[in-house]
Image (cartoon, rainbow, N blue to C red):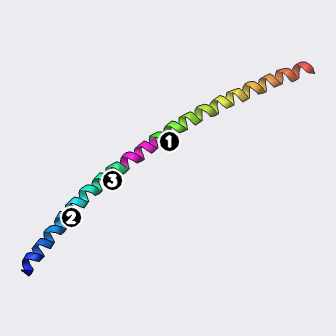
Amino acid sequence: MIGLVGLLFAGQVVFLQKTLMSKLEEIEDITIKLIDRWNKSDERYERRHEKAINEMNDITDDLAFLKGRINGRTN
């Protein structure tokens, strides 16, 4: 009787271990996909940010040029 209970317990431990390991692998795959998605999102944000900064720099340069032209005419 004790041997049978021990065998059932060992079988349950093996079953739970296999089940939990498969769930852990699924969670790991999902986590990797989420991290990849965040990285792609960050890359898109960086590109948009760089474009906005470049546009602002161009506008600032044009404004400085126009100010110089205006100040040059009044003197």
Residue 60: x %, y % from top left: 73, 29
The verdict on residue 37 being magenta is yes
CB contact under 8 Å: marks 2 and 1: no
Q: Which numbered disc flags the more N-terminal residue, 1 or 3?
A: 3
Q: Residues within 10 Å of mark 2 (few under 14, many from 20)?
A: few
* Apparent side of residue 27 relative to residue 50 in the rendered image (left or right): left
Q: Amino acid at mark 1?
A: Asp
At numbered mark 2, what does the secondary structure look like: helix, strand or loop? helix
CA–CA distance in space, label 2 to label 1: 39 Å
Residue assigned mark 3: 28
Please tell me the numbered disc located at residue 16: 2
Predominant SS of the magenta segment? helix
Residue that badge 1 annotates:
42
Left or right: residue 3 compared with residue 27: left
Q: Quadrant of the C terminus?
A: top right
Mark 2: amino acid? Leu
Furthest residue to the right? 75
Q: Is residue 68 above or below residue 20?
A: above
Across and down, in percent, residue 62 comes to: 73, 24
Identify the image quadrant of residue 68: top right
The percent coordinates of residue 69 (x first, y second) are: 83, 20
Mark sitting earlier along the chain (2/1): 2
Q: Could you give the CA–CA distance between mark 3 and mark 2, rounded to whole angstroms?
A: 18 Å
Amino acid type indicated by mark 3: Glu
Give the residues drawn in magenta, as a range.
Answer: 32-39
Crowd tier of the residue under label 1, counting other residues whose Cα lies within 10 Å: few below 14, some 14–19, many 20 or above: few
Q: Is residue 24 left or right of residue 60?
A: left
Residue at the top extreme of this rendering: 73
Compared with 72, 17 (above or below) is: below
